[in-house]
Amino acid sequence: MPAAVYAGLADLVLVVHGLVVLFVLFGFAAGIAWLIRGRPAWILHPAFRYSHLAAVGIVVGQAWLGRICPLTSWENALRRRAGQSGYEETFIAHWLHPLLFYTAPAWVFTVIYSVFGVLVGLVWWRAAQRSRAGKRSQGHLRL
């Protein structure tokens, strides 16, 4: 395969990785918005909640295990096949470092990801409680 194809595939993996990061961040923000305002209702759909929890769980698990995201590894492998240099750090560290000028040991990111994971779990747990309470109150006959 030509190097340009590998480079294009690496860019595609990078875009998918970016979309996963946005899903994780905006999913959390959407959960908080639902807790505050009670809408939009699609946030409570089980497919959304469980896929969001799974994505966050994978990030936290990788951080605790000291693993680099498979998407980062895949992108690096494709870039090397394209004759480009990959990067050794995580996706977040590589792309946010130039924006934030922030360097920290890996354990700092592990703590941040873990706290974020706990917050996401609490938001979805609370959202599920409120949703069940709302369904129960809708089932009662009001006179």
Image (cartoon, rainbow, N blue to C red):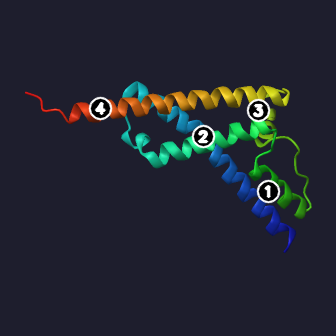
Q: Earlier in the sequence, mark 1 or mark 3?
A: 1
> Could you say which quadrant of the image residue 21 lies in?
top right
- Circle 3: residue type: Leu
Q: Nearer the viewer, residue 45 or 82?
A: 45
Location of mark 3 (residue): 99
- The secondary element bearing badge 3 is classed as helix
Q: Earlier in the sequence, mark 4 or mark 3?
A: 3
Question: What is the distance, in whole Å, between disc 1 and disc 4 at their CAs?
Answer: 44 Å
Q: Nearer the viewer, residue 79 or 108?
A: 108
Q: Give the image location of residue 135, x and y in percent.
A: 28, 36
Q: Residue at 20%, 36% (x, y): give it.
A: 139
Q: Earlier in the sequence, mark 2 or mark 4?
A: 2
- Circle 4: residue type: Gly
- The circle drawn on residue 74 is 1
Mark 4 neighbour class, 10 Å CA radius: few under 14, some 14 to 19, many 20 or more:
few
Compared across the picture, whether 121 is left or right of 111 comes to left
Q: Earlier in the sequence, mark 2 or mark 3?
A: 2
Mark 1 neighbour class, 10 Å CA radius: few under 14, some 14 to 19, many 20 or more:
some
